[in-house]
Amino acid sequence: MKSPLKHGLWIIICALVLVSASAQSQGTDIRGIVSDSLTSQRIPFANITIVGTSRGAATNNSGFFLVPKVPPGEYQVTASVIGYRRKVLNVSVKPGRAIDVNFQLASTPVEKEEVLVTAARRREVTEINTSIHVLEPRELKLAPVIAQEDVFHSLKMLPGIVSTSDVSSRFYVRGGAGDQNLVLLDGMKIFNPFHALGVFSLFDPDILQNVEMYTGAFPAGYGGRLSSVVNMTSRDGRSDRLSARGSLDFLSSKIRLEGPAIRGTTWMLNYRESLFSDTFRRIVDQNIPASFSDLFFKFKAQFPNGGKADFSLLSASDELRYSDLYRQTYSMLSPEPDYTWQTSAASGSFSNLLGERVFIQVFAHYTSYKANRSSSTTVEQPAYASVKEPGLRAQATYYTDSQDLFFFGFDLSFVTIEYKPVMKPGVLSNIYNSFVDASTWIRHQARYERFLLDLGLHMDFGSLVVGEEGIGAFQPRLNLSYEAFGNWKAKASIGLFNQRSITVNNEDDVMPIFDAWIKIPDNLPPERVSHIVLGLDGNTSATTSLNIQAYHKHYSSLVVYNRDKIDAADPDYIRGTGNSYGLEVLFRSKISIADLYATYTLSWSNVNNRGFGYPPRYDRRHHVNLLATAEPLKNLEITCRWEFGSGFPYSASVGYFDRLMLGNPFSSPIETETGKPYIAVGEKNGWRLPAYHRLDLSATFRFVVSGIRGSLGGQLINAYDRMNVYYFNRKTGVHTNMLRFFPSATLSLEH
């Protein structure tokens, strides 16, 4: 095992040294960092242009840019990005060493049409990938919210993303299962990104600088999941002064503190805690004794040579205490089990320029997830699950003379997964796995006249060295873009992906509560999928953009339950296959004072379990999202959102039968046994729930009083009180509805 990993590390180190040394004789480079003039926050995705030439660049996620091999002369170099004033610097280029040009940009009010068109196209059009959406905090807060702001609820506005419940932040991407989404925060892998019952995620939009959402065909460098990548980058604390912000809503309260420490360093602390249990009960329409809290801390240090170091810490805990509820309310033992969840994660990172042309980023990270189910009855058996993963990730970008880019790196982590279910009273099972998850990758990004090419190879050495994968460990990724006409681009993406760990949730659970991860059994190959995406996007006018994509995903290997299991010797899981395909449309525009955002998704997904085919529970044929925002008065913003979705599949109860229990023939003769009534279930997911639709309204007023900035918001969720069916009770046939009319309010104050 050690030899291939060691060889991979040596190859990457040698490549870094060679390309760095070769770059030093290539001419004069202009390079630098773009940051906020007030807070020193580095600004990603800023456009750098050398006036009067065709040369330029864009800052990376660390705010760094490099324009290679600029001829000697006098130039004006500009930096521009949405939300900041454009800045121009005079630069004198002479033969010799590279020139450092750093920009500090002053923030400015954002024009709405810039947000809706330019910002949306900042990455989707200029980058090559077909299926990427980059969202900033303001965009994460556009949609009306249930009780409190949430990142994952905002992501559900994007095409291709669905949720089986309007009160859950759990999501499914382009027909993929919920455990096929890779969630990253500052390089930390988060295995359980949800608070209790999945109602909200662990991530407060206020701590984030941006969110990169890959809905498919993600490039080399991301692996271990089949469907999507949610890559979140936290923002830095303020560098100019100490600042405090407090918020209160119908569910929780939060406080955020931030400011400078010693010279060149900043810090930020954000803490949230649930306060009002009645709100939980109203959201899920059950008497649920849930509580949660989460804490995020970040420390940043910037060095005179341009280097940057960060330390991030996330801690989240949840409790579901039915025992307390039944003891206090009914003075009896609870028939329901108690649940606790704990997520802890930390990362340290460093980024800087190595040599003349190689920009490196190194992450050391650790993640721990624990879940426990304790029960005093035999209705639901106790269980314990945990995941621990320390790791190291290094990635580098090499800038060439021709402005081509090479990306390469490795990710090495040591995963320990434990699952202890009680299969029957007094019998404890222990599923324990410890393995190395190691990968490396290389990508080449280049322009050939009207073509943009991104070709990469992601190599899963972890599965290769232990014999789980052969040629399947090598996963090619290709993204191609062609400038068709005007600013319209035609795009294509293909790629292969695999996954070695899954959750053991029953996919038919209405609201999964206990998430337990396991490594895929040794008798089965890793899950595998191929992605094909075709797209066309561009501007139909100065304030209108359109993006159309078609995709197909073929799952050549899926882990499914063994429907033919008879006795203990039969495997619990077998290999299945599946397909998912669809069409997505995304439209953005500004009409008069209104900013419009519309998406439509037409999709199909299917799972094949040894010849038995069925649609998964999250298969949705039609899905529409409409969002409109307007600012009729200064500091007053009004938002309206309407969502429509065709019904999800479910398995209906079709009758009852008396099942013979075949007990003790002496105490209960078989010939006189009448049996116990059992429910006969029809074709798996052969029925569809009624169509879903809902209207949400919100208004936010911003104010300043005695130097204190504040915002007061009100939301009307399900404004016309649509009774959307959540599920049918299998025993009674009575349906339970999703969230009914739900008003809420939020108040935030900042100094």
Image: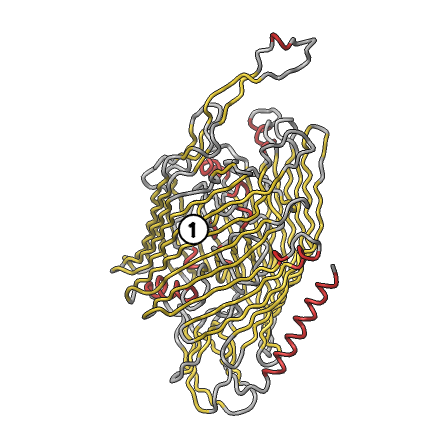
Q: Is 178 positioned to the left or the right of 410 in the image?
A: left
Q: Amino acid at mark 1?
A: Gly
> Where in the figure is residue 74, as x and y percent of width and height?
44, 90
Tell me if residue 208 comes above or below residue 652 in the rendering: below
What residue appears at the point 56 percent right and 47 percent down from the top-left corner? 179
Q: Residue furthest toward the right?
A: 2
Quadrant that contains the N terminus = bottom right
What residue appears at the point 43 percent right and 77 percent down from the top-left corner? 79
Tell me if residue 122 comes above or below residue 76 in the rendering: above
Tell me if residue 745 comes above or below residue 741 in the rendering: below
Residue in the foreground of this view, choosing between 743 and 669:
669
Q: Label 1: which residue?
A: 160
Is disc 1 placed on a helix, strand or loop?
Answer: loop
- Figure colour scheme: secondary structure
Q: Residue furthest toward the front?
A: 611
> Where in the figure is residue 540, as x and y percent of width and height?
29, 64
Residue in the foreground of this view, choosing between 676 and 337:
676
> Where in the figure is residue 410, as x and y percent of width and height?
63, 64
Residue 136 in view of the camera: no
> Where in the figure is residue 609, as x and y percent of width and height?
54, 39
Tell me if residue 23 comes above or below residue 263 in the rendering: below
The image shows a total of numbered marks equal to 1
Q: Is 339 positioned to the left or the right of 700 in the image?
A: right
What residue appears at the point 67 percent right and 75 percent down from the top-left corner? 14
Residue 568 in view of the camera: yes
Mark 1 burial class by Cα count in 10 Å: few <14, some 14-19, many 20+: many
